[in-house]
Amino acid sequence: MSFTEMYLEETKRIIGSLDVGAIDQMAALLANTRSRSGRLFFLGVGGSAANCSHAVNDFRKIAGIECYAPTDNVSELTARTNDEGWETVFVEWLKISHLTSEDAIFVFSVGGGSSERNVSQNLVSALRYAKGVGAKVLGVVGRDGGYTAKVADAVCIIPTINLNTVTPHAESFQAVIWHLLVMHPALKMNQTKWEQVR
Protein backbone atom coordinates (compact mmCIF):
# COMPACT_ATOMS: atom_id res chain seq x y z
CA MET A 1 0.00 0.00 0.00
CA SER A 2 1.36 3.42 -0.95
CA PHE A 3 1.51 6.29 1.54
CA THR A 4 -1.35 8.01 -0.29
CA GLU A 5 -3.54 4.90 -0.08
CA MET A 6 -2.64 4.45 3.60
CA TYR A 7 -3.42 8.08 4.48
CA LEU A 8 -6.77 8.02 2.71
CA GLU A 9 -7.62 4.68 4.31
CA GLU A 10 -6.90 6.23 7.73
CA THR A 11 -9.18 9.13 6.78
CA LYS A 12 -12.01 6.73 5.94
CA ARG A 13 -11.54 4.92 9.25
CA ILE A 14 -11.68 8.22 11.16
CA ILE A 15 -14.92 9.22 9.42
CA GLY A 16 -16.46 5.89 10.39
CA SER A 17 -15.40 6.37 14.02
CA LEU A 18 -16.59 9.94 14.67
CA ASP A 19 -19.05 10.44 17.51
CA VAL A 20 -22.15 11.71 15.67
CA GLY A 21 -23.97 12.33 18.95
CA ALA A 22 -21.20 14.64 20.16
CA ILE A 23 -21.37 16.66 16.94
CA ASP A 24 -25.15 17.03 17.22
CA GLN A 25 -24.68 18.07 20.86
CA MET A 26 -22.28 20.79 19.69
CA ALA A 27 -24.85 22.01 17.17
CA ALA A 28 -27.49 22.26 19.90
CA LEU A 29 -25.15 24.13 22.27
CA LEU A 30 -24.15 26.57 19.54
CA ALA A 31 -27.78 27.19 18.58
CA ASN A 32 -28.52 27.87 22.23
CA THR A 33 -25.59 30.30 22.44
CA ARG A 34 -26.90 32.17 19.41
CA SER A 35 -30.47 32.30 20.78
CA ARG A 36 -29.12 33.95 23.97
CA SER A 37 -27.11 36.46 21.88
CA GLY A 38 -23.96 34.88 23.28
CA ARG A 39 -20.59 35.18 21.59
CA LEU A 40 -18.32 32.40 20.39
CA PHE A 41 -14.56 32.53 20.93
CA PHE A 42 -12.31 30.17 18.95
CA LEU A 43 -9.01 29.19 20.57
CA GLY A 44 -6.17 27.34 18.87
CA VAL A 45 -2.45 27.51 18.13
CA GLY A 46 -0.39 26.71 15.05
CA GLY A 47 -2.44 25.19 12.24
CA SER A 48 -5.42 25.13 14.56
CA ALA A 49 -5.16 28.92 14.90
CA ALA A 50 -5.49 29.24 11.13
CA ASN A 51 -8.55 26.99 11.31
CA CYS A 52 -9.98 29.25 14.02
CA SER A 53 -9.72 32.24 11.71
CA HIS A 54 -11.56 30.44 8.92
CA ALA A 55 -14.21 29.13 11.33
CA VAL A 56 -14.88 32.65 12.66
CA ASN A 57 -15.74 33.73 9.12
CA ASP A 58 -18.09 30.79 8.55
CA PHE A 59 -19.91 30.96 11.88
CA ARG A 60 -20.43 34.70 11.48
CA LYS A 61 -21.43 34.65 7.80
CA ILE A 62 -23.34 31.37 7.53
CA ALA A 63 -24.59 30.71 11.07
CA GLY A 64 -25.07 34.30 12.22
CA ILE A 65 -23.12 33.94 15.46
CA GLU A 66 -20.92 36.73 16.80
CA CYS A 67 -17.43 35.16 16.78
CA TYR A 68 -13.83 36.06 17.49
CA ALA A 69 -10.38 34.44 17.52
CA PRO A 70 -7.70 36.09 19.69
CA THR A 71 -5.01 34.87 17.28
CA ASP A 72 -6.46 37.13 14.57
CA ASN A 73 -5.18 40.15 16.53
CA VAL A 74 -1.44 39.71 15.93
CA SER A 75 -0.49 42.97 17.67
CA GLU A 76 -2.22 42.08 20.93
CA LEU A 77 -1.14 38.44 20.75
CA THR A 78 2.54 39.31 20.36
CA ALA A 79 2.42 42.14 22.89
CA ARG A 80 0.90 39.85 25.51
CA THR A 81 3.36 37.06 24.67
CA ASN A 82 6.27 39.46 25.03
CA ASP A 83 5.07 41.32 28.12
CA GLU A 84 3.11 38.71 30.08
CA GLY A 85 4.03 35.30 28.70
CA TRP A 86 2.53 32.77 26.30
CA GLU A 87 0.50 30.94 28.95
CA THR A 88 -1.79 33.90 29.61
CA VAL A 89 -2.43 35.23 26.08
CA PHE A 90 -5.91 33.70 25.77
CA VAL A 91 -7.18 34.12 29.32
CA GLU A 92 -6.24 37.80 29.45
CA TRP A 93 -7.87 38.37 26.07
CA LEU A 94 -11.08 36.72 27.35
CA LYS A 95 -11.03 38.87 30.49
CA ILE A 96 -10.84 42.06 28.42
CA SER A 97 -13.69 40.69 26.28
CA HIS A 98 -15.81 40.27 29.44
CA LEU A 99 -16.53 36.59 28.84
CA THR A 100 -19.84 35.61 30.49
CA SER A 101 -22.01 32.56 31.02
CA GLU A 102 -23.92 33.51 27.85
CA ASP A 103 -20.79 32.94 25.74
CA ALA A 104 -19.00 29.82 24.51
CA ILE A 105 -15.41 28.78 23.86
CA PHE A 106 -14.61 26.52 20.91
CA VAL A 107 -11.18 24.86 21.04
CA PHE A 108 -9.36 23.51 18.00
CA SER A 109 -6.32 21.57 19.19
CA VAL A 110 -4.36 18.43 18.42
CA GLY A 111 -3.78 17.61 22.09
CA GLY A 112 -6.38 19.73 23.88
CA GLY A 113 -3.87 21.27 26.29
CA SER A 114 -2.15 19.58 29.21
CA SER A 115 -0.61 20.96 32.39
CA GLU A 116 1.00 17.60 33.10
CA ARG A 117 2.74 17.52 29.72
CA ASN A 118 3.34 21.30 29.71
CA VAL A 119 1.69 21.61 26.30
CA SER A 120 -0.71 24.41 25.27
CA GLN A 121 -0.94 25.82 28.78
CA ASN A 122 -2.61 28.88 27.27
CA LEU A 123 -5.62 26.70 26.44
CA VAL A 124 -5.71 25.23 29.95
CA SER A 125 -5.64 28.68 31.57
CA ALA A 126 -8.36 29.97 29.26
CA LEU A 127 -10.61 26.98 29.86
CA ARG A 128 -10.24 27.21 33.63
CA TYR A 129 -11.33 30.84 33.42
CA ALA A 130 -14.20 30.01 31.05
CA LYS A 131 -15.55 27.31 33.35
CA GLY A 132 -15.21 29.72 36.27
CA VAL A 133 -17.54 32.24 34.64
CA GLY A 134 -19.94 29.57 33.40
CA ALA A 135 -19.22 29.78 29.66
CA LYS A 136 -19.86 26.65 27.62
CA VAL A 137 -16.82 24.82 26.24
CA LEU A 138 -16.72 22.91 22.97
CA GLY A 139 -13.83 21.32 21.16
CA VAL A 140 -12.53 19.37 18.21
CA VAL A 141 -9.35 17.73 19.43
CA GLY A 142 -7.04 14.81 18.71
CA ARG A 143 -5.20 12.21 20.80
CA ASP A 144 -7.05 11.76 24.12
CA GLY A 145 -8.46 15.29 24.02
CA GLY A 146 -6.33 16.53 26.91
CA TYR A 147 -7.75 19.16 29.26
CA THR A 148 -10.36 20.22 26.70
CA ALA A 149 -11.96 16.78 26.74
CA LYS A 150 -11.98 16.77 30.55
CA VAL A 151 -13.92 20.02 30.93
CA ALA A 152 -15.86 20.42 27.68
CA ASP A 153 -19.63 20.47 27.55
CA ALA A 154 -19.39 18.89 24.10
CA VAL A 155 -16.28 17.57 22.39
CA CYS A 156 -15.44 15.57 19.29
CA ILE A 157 -12.22 13.62 19.67
CA ILE A 158 -10.62 12.72 16.35
CA PRO A 159 -9.60 9.06 16.76
CA THR A 160 -5.91 8.23 16.54
CA ILE A 161 -5.46 5.66 13.78
CA ASN A 162 -1.74 6.11 13.22
CA LEU A 163 0.65 7.77 15.71
CA ASN A 164 2.62 9.20 12.77
CA THR A 165 -0.34 11.17 11.38
CA VAL A 166 -2.11 12.49 14.48
CA THR A 167 -1.59 16.19 13.73
CA PRO A 168 -2.65 16.31 10.06
CA HIS A 169 -5.76 14.25 10.69
CA ALA A 170 -6.77 16.25 13.78
CA GLU A 171 -6.34 19.58 12.00
CA SER A 172 -8.03 18.34 8.82
CA PHE A 173 -11.06 17.08 10.70
CA GLN A 174 -11.42 20.35 12.57
CA ALA A 175 -12.38 21.75 9.17
CA VAL A 176 -14.71 18.85 8.41
CA ILE A 177 -16.55 19.28 11.71
CA TRP A 178 -16.89 23.07 11.64
CA HIS A 179 -18.12 23.00 8.04
CA LEU A 180 -20.64 20.33 9.03
CA LEU A 181 -21.80 22.51 11.92
CA VAL A 182 -22.34 25.72 9.94
CA MET A 183 -24.41 23.73 7.43
CA HIS A 184 -26.36 21.90 10.17
CA PRO A 185 -30.10 22.72 10.05
CA ALA A 186 -29.94 23.87 13.67
CA LEU A 187 -27.36 26.53 12.79
CA LYS A 188 -27.39 27.48 9.11
CA MET A 189 -29.03 30.86 8.55
CA ASN A 190 -27.56 32.07 5.27
CA GLN A 191 -26.99 30.37 1.92
CA THR A 192 -23.45 29.79 0.69
CA LYS A 193 -22.54 31.31 -2.68
CA TRP A 194 -21.80 28.27 -4.81
CA GLU A 195 -24.92 26.45 -3.70
CA GLN A 196 -26.90 29.29 -5.30
CA VAL A 197 -25.05 29.28 -8.64
CA ARG A 198 -26.63 27.05 -11.25
Image (cartoon, rainbow, N blue to C red):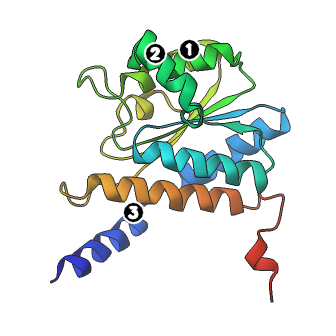
Under mark 1, the amino acid is Glu
Under mark 3, the amino acid is Ser
Estimate how packed mark 2 is, as few (under 14), some (14 to 19) or many (20 or more) residues with alpha carbons within 10 Å.
some
Could you tell me if residue 20 is visible in this image?
Answer: no
3 or 1: tag closer to the N-terminus:
3
The residue at 76%/68% (across/down) is 192
Q: Are marks 3 and 1 in contact (CB under 8 Å)?
A: no
Residue 92 numbered mark, or none: 1
Q: Is residue 101 left or right of residue 45?
A: right
Nearer the observer, 44 or 124: 44
Give coordinates of residue 157: x percent, y percent: 41, 48
Q: Is residue 61 above or below residue 138?
A: below
**Quarter of the image with the N terminus in it:** bottom left
Identify the residue position indicated by label 3 in the image.
17
Q: Are marks 1 and 2 in contact (CB under 8 Å)?
A: yes
Identify the residue position indicated by label 2 in the image.
88
User: In what element is the residue under mark 1?
Assistant: helix
Mark 3 vs mark 1, CA separation in Å: 36 Å
Under mark 2, the amino acid is Thr
**Quarter of the image with the C terminus in it:** bottom right
Q: Quadrant of residue 160?
A: bottom left
Q: Quadrant of residue 4?
A: bottom left
User: In what element is the residue under mark 2?
Assistant: helix
Mark 1 vs mark 2, CA separation in Å: 6 Å
User: In what element is the residue under mark 3?
Assistant: helix
